[in-house]
Amino acid sequence: MANTITFISCGVISLLLLMSIMLAGPHLLLPATFMIVTILVGGFCIYIADGMIKQRAEIMKKWED
């Protein structure tokens, strides 16, 4: 569930930043591009962390049995 929410929120925020580039002009191109990259990298980190937490839960469950 966290991965779905992460992907949707990253997409929405990236679209908002792209719209700000189109509406405000090319002088926002560089900062908005860095913000989009930061959002996508952060979403990737959340995706990896969620996978690690799920793997840890599976390992702990197997260890208890």
Image (cartoon, helix red, strand yellow):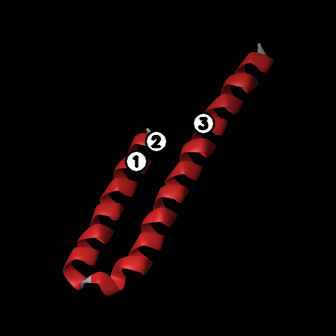
- Please tell me which residue lies in front, 33 or 15: 33
Residue 59 rendering spot, x and y as whole percentages: 73, 24
Q: Earlier in the sequence, mark 1 or mark 3?
A: 1
Residue denoted by label 2 = 3
Other residues around mark 2 within 10 Å, as few (<14) / some (14–19) / many (≥20): some
- Kindly state the secondary structure of the residue where label 1 is placed: helix
Asked if 59 appears above or below 23 in the picture, the reply is: above
On-image quarter of the N terminus = top left
Cα distance between the residues tagged 3 and 2:
9 Å
Q: Amino acid at mark 3?
A: Gly
- Kindly state the secondary structure of the residue where label 3 is placed: helix
Q: Amino acid at mark 2?
A: Asn
Q: Do labels 2 and 1 touch, CB within 8 Å?
A: yes
Asked if 46 appears above or below 38 in the picture, the reply is: above
Q: Residue at 51% of width from left, 65% of height from top? A: 38
Q: Quadrant of residue 36?
A: bottom left
Q: Quadrant of residue 63?
A: top right
Q: Residue at 29% of width from left, 82% of height from top? A: 26
Q: Earlier in the sequence, mark 3 or mark 2?
A: 2
On-image quarter of the C terminus = top right
Residue denoted by label 3 = 51
Give me the disc on residue 60.
none
Q: Quadrant of residue 64?
A: top right
- Kindly state the secondary structure of the residue where label 2 is placed: helix
Residue 27 rendering spot, x and y as whole percentages: 33, 87
Cα distance between the residues tagged 2 and 1:
6 Å
Residue denoted by label 1 = 7
Q: Residue at 34% of width from left, 63% of height from top? A: 13
| Side of 39 where 29 appears, left or right | left
Other residues around mark 1 within 10 Å, as few (<14) / some (14–19) / many (≥20): some
